[in-house]
Image (cartoon, rainbow, N blue to C red):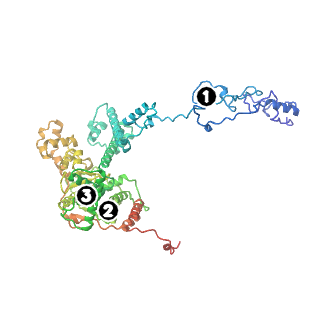
């Protein structure tokens, strides 16, 4: 067996298997299968080998037609395609062998006589490219105008003189005011989610916006007292598998999105812009002037008037350093902007991811405050103006309200450790901007704002309060009052006036304290009267006029639970009324300011120093604010230092 010659794979007998043919048994090709030695096969001559090889080879036709791949074929038209041929996309259960190309022809069982390809049959191809089919979920929602356009086009297809109409989107769809706008979509989602919440509550409807009713649904009516339904509680319950808590959490989030979208559309309709306080102020003045002169004009006229008002205000401020009550020549004096800085620091801390300097100093809240001040003031500062802006701070430690009610704000935890050092950094940022800082020992920032607002109104200045605190809404003056006090929403820079207070709370601003005393304020740990919410409180005040008159006639309240709650908690509610009342008479000796000023009319920012602010950003490693400031300085050309030239680098050793 060792001396046996190796069988050549080329030499094959007619009755031998091909090496590539599969078979269950593989005994003939095994050279070492453990069997006894067998004599080798009888060798054949070269002529026999050649004849054997020729007999085993398949026979092919002399000329083969070239089959063009489908991706190289031109689009077939009706003139090219035959009438009796099948379409390429037509399905058929049977596929005749004549339709195959030569390479795709099925193998014959006899290797000696392979079938010849039929070149007389022309392969069939599609008449035209099949149009792309768009899934239904990707198609835009058809409006009434689109449907009418489609119907008109379909009726005119047979008429050569009237070609079909091209379907176009309606004009309202491009402007975002169509029936299927983003606000409509959000409202539909909110309605669907509300019905889902009612279904989870066995079909019983309740006020999903009421924290007390939500607590009754989640924890039971007996466990409402002391139960919280804030964000952390709902998230914990939702993660534990509580479907009701998850739906309520989504409902609150979606409600905020609806309110933001409504506010954005209202702002867009007015022509105001986000993060443009002074521009919106000028546009508001222009609208008032147009209304007084006999009606509002076009939007372009409003913009021209707003620019004119802005120029007038700027020119007046540049020529006067102290402004008194002499404002007969100016339709509106530049208002005093009071910023609730302590509240904004907390807002920035919770909305911005943690940021740190290279040495580990936290700077997240500082970054948010600097971005706010830069967006608010930088445009006017680069013009050389000195706006009236004041940053009001809370005094560190307890205030007079803790002496009246020890549980005041007792539900709040301690200040976060990484936020404590940022208060001092915010004060440094205010000095870098040149903004006046005011605080009062034993008082909150709300009391400081109330005192400064009263003094400014007495000096004939309008006041804008930059805050979202509902307690400060008590300071808003009625419509038509001169001078006036308004609030500015810190998120969108929207103006909050007297009508907005009535729309939200159901009562005017001077009665808002009564509503807060009756309904309570969970943020300040003021419980209010049990069983009375903001809407019920507003209804009672509309019926009885004032809070004192309500308690004097509490026996006449028809509802038994309300009557009992008012009678039992009358003294507490009167105490709560004192807690929510803002003190606007802080003594001057208790107020400390970073800048000495005499009268609110002379209170202004110091001259802007871009190098001072740039050095502060560099020291705090606020790269985003630094780049924005550098870009604005470059575009305005004010105190901009160009990069060093090549000659200045000659003496640098590197």
Q: Residues within 10 Å of mark 2 (few under 14, many from 20)?
A: some
Most extreme residue toward the front, as rendered?
Answer: 161
Q: How many marks?
A: 3
Which residue corresponds to mark 2? 380
Give the x, y percent position of residue 447. Answer: 22, 57
Q: Dividing the image into 4 quarters, which one contains the N terminus?
A: top right
Which residue corresponds to mark 1? 82
**What's the distance in space between the residues labelled 2 and 1, CA to CA?**
78 Å
Which residue corresponds to mark 3? 445
**What's the distance in space between the residues labelled 2 and 3, CA to CA?**
26 Å
Looking at the rendered structure, the secondary structure element under dot 1 is loop
Q: Mark 2 or 3 closer to N-term?
A: 2
Looking at the rendered structure, the secondary structure element under dot 3 is helix
Horizontal relation, residue 15 to residue 367: left or right: right
Label annotation for residue 410 = none
Give the x, y percent position of residue 316. Answer: 25, 65
In the rendered structure, are the residues bearing label 2 and label 3 in contact, judged by CB atoms less than 8 Å apart? no
In the image, what residue occupies the spot 30% across and 65% down? 385
Q: Is residue 347 visible?
A: yes
Q: Mark 1 or 3 closer to N-term?
A: 1
Up-down relation of residue 432 to residue 233 (above or below):
below
Give the x, y percent position of residue 527. Answer: 23, 46
Q: Is residue 407 visible?
A: no
Give the x, y percent position of residue 374. Answer: 35, 60
In the rendered structure, are the residues bearing label 1 and label 3 in contact, judged by CB atoms less than 8 Å apart? no
Task: Nearest to the eye among marks 2 and 3: give it.
Answer: 2
Up-down relation of residue 510 to residue 7 (above or below):
below
Task: Residue 424: name its quadrant.
Answer: bottom left
């Amino acid at each position: 067996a060792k001396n046996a010659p190796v069988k050549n794979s080329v030499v094959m007998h007619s009755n031998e298997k091909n090496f590539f043919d599969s078979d269950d048994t593989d005994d003939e090709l095994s050279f070492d299968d453990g069997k006894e030695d067998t004599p080798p096969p009888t060798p054949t001559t070269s002529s026999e080998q050649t004849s054997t090889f020729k007999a085993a080879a398949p026979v092919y036709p002399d000329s083969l037609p070239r089959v063009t791949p489908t991706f190289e074929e031109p689009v077939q038209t009706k003139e090219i395609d035959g009438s009796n041929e099948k379409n390429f996309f037509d399905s058929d259960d049977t596929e005749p062998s004549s339709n195959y190309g030569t390479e795709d022809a099925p193998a014959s069982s006899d290797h000696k006589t392979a079938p010849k390809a039929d070149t007389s049959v022309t392969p069939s191809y599609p008449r035209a490219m099949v149009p792309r089919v768009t899934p239904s979920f990707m198609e835009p929602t058809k409006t009434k105008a689109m449907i009418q356009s489609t119907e008109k086009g379909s009726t005119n297809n047979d008429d050569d003189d009237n070609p079909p109409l091209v379907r176009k989107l309606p004009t309202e769809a491009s402007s975002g005011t169509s029936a299927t706008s983003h606000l409509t979509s959000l409202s539909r989602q909110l309605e669907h989610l509300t019905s889902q919440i009612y279904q989870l509550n066995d079909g019983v409807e309740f006020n999903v916006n009421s924290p007390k009713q939500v607590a009754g649904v989640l924890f039971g009516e007996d466990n409402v007292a002391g139960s919280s339904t804030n964000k952390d509680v709902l998230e914990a319950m939702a993660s534990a598998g509580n479907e009701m808590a998850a739906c309520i959490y989504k409902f609150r989030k979606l409600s905020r999105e609806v309110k933001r979208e409504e506010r954005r559309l209202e702002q867009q309709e007015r022509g105001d812009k986000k993060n443009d306080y002074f521009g919106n102020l000028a546009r508001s003045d222009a609208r008032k002037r147009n209304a007084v002169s006999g009606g509002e004009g076009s939007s372009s006229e409003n913009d021209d008037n707003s620019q004119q008002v802005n120029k007038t205000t700027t020119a007046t401020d540049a020529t006067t350093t102290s402004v008194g009550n002499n404002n007969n020549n100016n339709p509106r004096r530049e208002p005093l902007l009071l910023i609730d800085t302590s509240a904004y620091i907390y807002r920035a801390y919770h909305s911005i991811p943690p940021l740190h300097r290279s040495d580990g100093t936290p700077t997240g809240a500082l970054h948010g405050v600097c971005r706010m001040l830069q967006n608010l003031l930088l445009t006017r500062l680069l013009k050389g103006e000195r706006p009236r802006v004041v940053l009001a701070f809370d005094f560190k430690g307890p205030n007079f309200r803790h002496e009246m009610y020890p549980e005041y704000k007792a539900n709040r935890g301690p200040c976060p450790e990484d936020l404590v050092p940022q208060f001092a950094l915010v004060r440094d940022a205010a000095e870098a901007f040149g903004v006046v800082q005011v605080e009062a020992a034993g008082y909150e920032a709300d009391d400081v704002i109330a005192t400064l607002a009263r003094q400014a109104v007495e000096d004939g200045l309008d006041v804008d309060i930059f805050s979202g605190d509902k307690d400060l809404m008590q300071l808003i003056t009625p419509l038509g009052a001169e001078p006036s006090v308004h609030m500015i929403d810190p998120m969108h820079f929207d103006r909050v006036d007297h009508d907005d207070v009535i729309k939200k709370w159901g009562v005017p601003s001077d009665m808002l304290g009564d509503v807060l005393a009756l309904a309570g304020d969970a943020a300040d740990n003021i419980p209010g009267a049990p069983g009375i919410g903001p809407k019920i409180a507003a209804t009672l005040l509309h019926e009885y006029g004032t809070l004192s008159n309500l308690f004097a006639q509490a026996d006449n309240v028809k509802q038994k639970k309300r009557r009992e709650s008012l009678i039992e908690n009358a003294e507490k509610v009167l105490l709560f009324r004192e807690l929510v009342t803002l003190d606007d008479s802080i003594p001057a000796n208790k107020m400390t300011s970073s800048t000495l000023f005499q009268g609110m009319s002379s209170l202004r920012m110091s001259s802007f120093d871009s190098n001072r602010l740039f050095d502060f950003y560099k020291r705090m490693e606020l790269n985003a604010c630094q780049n924005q400031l550098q870009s604005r300085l470059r575009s305005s050309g004010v105190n901009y230092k160009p990069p060093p030239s090549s000659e200045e680098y000659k003496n640098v050793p590197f």
